[in-house]
Amino acid sequence: MLRTYTSSFPSLTPLHFGASAPAICEFRALRHARKTPIATASAPIRVASIPSAHPYIHAITDPHRVALLPDPPVPGAPPEQWWPPVAMTAPWLSENAAEYDVLHVHFGLESFSPDDLRAGLDAARRAGHPVVFTVHDLDNPQIVDQEPYRALLDVIVPAADRLVTLTPSAAAEIERRWGRESSVLAHPTLLDEAAAPERETEPDADADADADADDTVRVGIHLRDLRPNIDAESAVRAAVDAARMWEGAGRRVAVEVLLNERVRDDRLADRVVAAAAGQTAVRVRRTPYLDDAEIQAWLSGLDLFVLPYRHGTHSGWVELCYDLGVRVAGTDVGHIRSQHPSEFRVVDLGDPRTLADALTWAGDARHPSSVVGDHLANRRAERSEERRAVREAHARLYSDVIAGVPA
């Protein structure tokens, strides 16, 4: 599912529970009211994760040392839907206090008012359970007006016992804005061995020769359902102009723009399709919602993926492209370029020459298929080890925060 590659949950439906809102100073005072740690060497640490059923959460979780509580059912929603997150509400956190040791918040703040969020954090605190917050988003990609979301950050960032984020630059921004330090733990790979198998037989030399002889640079842009932070029309217009520049220089490029059949703005979708009308090098293709395997297969055939964000903080797309050996060109927003700087090129959608330069950068990085296979095999091994280290770091963080070890 595309939800795998986004760091915000896809529903903006408000959820209000009418809970009281204690002052943040009470949160701080209650930090010292710790219960005796429940977890032992033989008992996994029980984590109420917000959410639990999310690929990123499972990627950071050591299943031998950490037990994730399942997401509570959401009234009126399909069984697999975790949002709006019931486990973040004060009643659930109080009624299930004996079932978890740590509350770890990742996504889903948008469902709550600041008062509701304070009430949930206070309920965990009163139960004697520490709170960990991973700051995935300093700007929320699902909304245009960031002020309501920033108000929620102003509640949870100062109140959490420990903070985690994905990049050093994001940690620096958190310290600058709130005066708090964060543990920097990289976004681990979400691929397993089955998703990127090793070649078990010798490659077909003729097939490789044909593929390597094709000098067309293949570019992909996925506009998804036209969520607010995607600058869709500008991205397509920039691609059209950059392709003309390349064709004028005698080079070949094929740009495929994917757009969901169901979108948030049908008029914008029409403008996106019209922007590429009559172009041979740029094609807009409407698709149903693609699952993870389909996304991975599509990305694997690209030399360059374009990420046309207006705002954002981190990107799961960048992580997936890194795993698949696909370079990324994107706008300079948030801390996305800090995730894998060597594989990311900044572009300005208002200046198509920057995208044309990124095409050259991606085209010059192409290697014969046999070299690519060896490179990706080494990268998969490195990423697997990184994931093991990230899991170890999270398990250690939970142990320390339960024991009251200072950050």
Image (cartoon, helix red, strand yellow):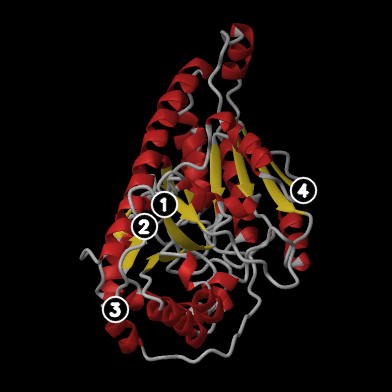
Residue 302 is at least partly visible in this image: yes
The residue under label 3 is which amino acid type? Ala
The residue beneath circle 3 is 33
Image x and y of residue 42, in percent? 37, 47
Tell me: 275 left or right of 25: right
Q: Is residue 116 above or below residue 181?
A: below
Image x and y of residue 207, in percent? 64, 12
Q: Are marks 3 and 4 in contact (CB under 8 Å)?
A: no
Q: Is residue 374 above or below residue 206?
A: below
Cα separation, mark 3 vs mark 1, equals 22 Å
Q: Is residue 375 above or below residue 104?
A: above
| Numbered circle sitting on residue 44 | 1
Between discs 3 and 1, the one toward the N terminus: 3
The residue under label 1 is which amino acid type? Pro
Tell me: 208 left or right of 277: left
| Numbered circle sitting on residue 341 | none
Cα separation, mark 3 vs mark 4, equals 53 Å
Cα separation, mark 4 vs mark 1, equals 42 Å
Image x and y of residue 34, in percent? 30, 73
Label 1, secondary structure: give it.
Answer: loop
| Numbered circle sitting on residue 287 | 4
Residue 237, quarter of picture = bottom right
Looking at the image, is mark 2 or mark 4 nearer the viewer?
A: 2
Between discs 3 and 4, the one toward the N terminus: 3
